[in-house]
Image: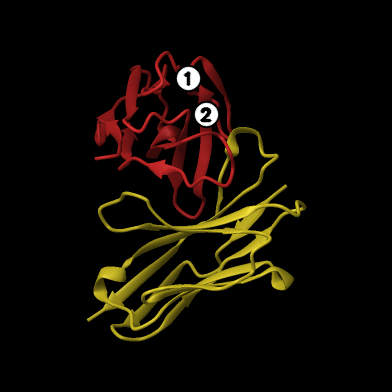
Chain colours: A yellow, B red
Amino acid sequence: AQKVTQAQTEISVVEKEDVTLDCVYETRDTTYYLFWYKQPPSGELVFLIRRNSFDEQNEISGRYSWNFQKSTSSFNFTITASQVVDSAVYFCALSQPYNAGNMLTFGGGTRLMVKP
Amino acid sequence: EAQVTQNPRYLITVTGKKLTVTCSQNMNHEYMSWYRQDPGLGLRQIYYSMNVEVTDKGDVPEGYKVSRKEKRNFPLILESPSPNQTSLYFCASSPTGVSNQPQHFGDGTRLSIL
């Protein structure tokens, strides 16, 4: 069975600080896909990134970066120079080709509060 | 604009009164699914549909029904709602049921069952 753990339930930072959101996953499959979604206070879910299990290159998109490490089964998300607009709940999720129904297994989410 | 539309966005109702949450997508996606979000649990899949007339149970299907008569619509039906179904519900779609495709989510429906 697969599992995603986001141990940090809530993080509070001051604007311009860097912050890293942790995500640890469990799966027996060698092929899988990892995702990050953002849920702002308005409630919708916004797709941020997808990473394939066979591609361990880190990715940077503006102030966002993702560190995928298969050796530690982690897919961490860093926001550099955080802004108030980054305040949201962030979800890490896992999917596998042999999962019936293309089910996404979500972590419990990390609530990030960025204070001015 | 490509989107997944859910209605209603908010609903307060009473135990046992049948309700339907509609979901419609305008992206011609084959795959659609329903999730519920509960504090600390993330999102859990209720039902999914790989295509028209093809539906199946997800992780937490008890107390729910779905139908997929048309490609664009995937309503979630609670025949006899109970308080433990109070939750935030999301409909999602993707081009196909291939697991590497990101799912596009609707804005959510907050249901309160009294």
Distance between mark 2 and mark 1 Cα atoms = 8 Å
User: A93 left or right of B68?
Assistant: right
Residue B38 locus on image (x, y percent)? 45, 47
SS label for mark 1 = strand
Residue position for label 2 = B47
Q: Chain of mark 2?
A: B
Residue type indicated by callout 1: Lys
Residue position for label 1 = B65
Query: Residue drawn 52% across and 29% down?
Result: B48
Q: Which mark is residue B28?
A: none
Characterize the local packing of mark 1: few (<14), some (14-19) or many (20 or more) Cα atoms within 10 angstroms.
some
Front residue of A115/B27: it is: B27
- Are the residues flagged by discs 2 and 1 in contact, CB closer than 8 Å? yes
Query: Residue drawn 66% across and 52% down?
Result: A32
Residue type indicated by callout 2: Tyr
Characterize the local packing of mark 2: few (<14), some (14-19) or many (20 or more) Cα atoms within 10 angstroms.
many
Q: Quadrant of the C terminus of chain A?
A: bottom left
**Marks 2 and 1 belong to one chain:** yes
Position of residue B73 relative to residue B69, above or below, is below
